[in-house]
Image (cartoon, rainbow, N blue to C red):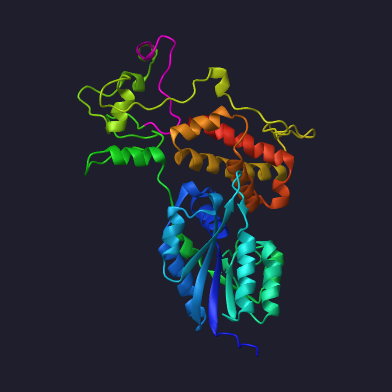
Amino acid sequence: MLLSMSRKSVIFVDAGFLLATGGLRVTGNSLRSAFSVQYKNLVDGIQEFVSERDSRDLLRMYWYDAAKDGVFSDEHKRIGLLPGVKVRLGRMSYNGEQKGVDLKLGLDLVGVARNRSADVAYLLSGDDDLAEAVEAAQDLGMKVVLLGIENQGHRLGVTAVAEHLALQVDDIATLPQSLLDRCFAKSAPVAEAAAQAAAPAGASLGNGVSSNGAGHAPGTRPVPGPGVLPAFSPAGPEAGAATASGPEAAGPPAGAEPADDSVSAAASPAGTPGRPVPTPGPRRAPQDLRPVPAAGMVRREPVYSTATGAPAAQSPWFDLVESAEAVAVSLADNWHGSVSQRELNELLAERPLLPPTIDRVLIKDCAAKIGEAKTDLQDIRKAIRAAFWRRLDELV
């Protein structure tokens, strides 16, 4: 005897898709270390949206993500302990790619439909690979509704959803962007967080102190951020201080106190008892600090008209490269602000190669901004990688 379909709903969340979308909105890139998420508020917001739209009882929410060796991280444990949420993990490859996540989601979608545990599924994803699983669930009598993130500028009205997937679902429901704005926030840079932790209780760093020392309170020295190297000269620190010039070399005015312990540590001689000494990055010759030019980079010189001698109008190709390079600059800013000195040293040691995890985020975010087909052009890929290194040179 065929069981009747339960009058329940179920939610399937592709966490990689959701977190990348939220990260792009608040930071300009999908690097996870660059943003923080209030997971309880995010889960509650999605469930409330579905309950307002659908009077059915919610069976549960399935949360799909990837982790190294498929082992739960502390973050995944916190999510899994939320009421009505089941976390399902795939594996993370060495280059940051998810393995097995789409397969688990597709199998669960079809399995719930086959067991007739729910008659409506809400799918929060944009992956074209799920289209076949959606069709199989529909053949078993389940209705599938796509949950998309609102995007009025897109012809589908949602962000980063494959057209083939959108054509297979029964309906599209649009989550408001305000949900992401409430639940996602840009992470504090590592240097800033360390400075705040080192400051005495109740002390303030001042409005001018930033993670890279770009601004600082009057009478204090800036807090060094990741990759900010101490002055170096062949004769040692003392000689370096003697030959330095300018306001920063003179140090703070007489009687002025350092902004916090991290500033004092950077200014104190190495080996002073009780004072942490920052680990300097790799010492490079001045010529090594120049950006590494990439082959095939687009020229920045204006193209002059032979008829008038005046600069020609800016080409669409120039605009395309500018948009792509903006993605690289944003990623470099956020990555630099979220890593330790050791991680920065490791990256610089591999130059000009980018680690697979960073390169993958760079290409994926570029594709989200200018389109996958244009990102596949080798000149574009060379340009964004070179732009990443140029920006990193400016930061360190």
- Quadrant of the image for the N terminus? bottom right
Locate residue 19, reporting x and y percent: 52, 57
**Is 293 left, or right, of 309 in this rendering?**
left
**273 versus 309 height, above or below:** above
Q: Which residue lies furthest to the top in this view?
A: 235
**Is 115 left, or right, of 373 in this rendering?**
left
Q: Which residue lies furthest to the front in this view?
A: 1
**257 versus 194 height, above or below:** above
**77 versus 62 height, above or below:** above
Residue depicted at x 44% and y 61%: 79
**Is 255 left, or right, of 341 in this rendering?**
left
Which of 318/175 is in front? 175
Residue depicted at x 51% and y 70%: 61
Locate residue 377, reporting x and y percent: 74, 43
Locate residue 363, reporting x and y percent: 64, 46
Q: Which secondary structure type mostly characterizes the magenta part of the structure?
A: loop
The answer to whether residue 207 is seen in the rendering is no
The answer to whether residue 56 is seen in the rendering is yes
Q: Is residue 293 magenta?
A: no
What span is in magenta? 224-239
Q: Residue furthest right?
A: 307
Q: Is residue 226 magenta?
A: yes
Residue depicted at x 44% and y 32%: 341
Q: How many labels does the image show?
A: 0
Locate residue 212, reporting x and y percent: 41, 35
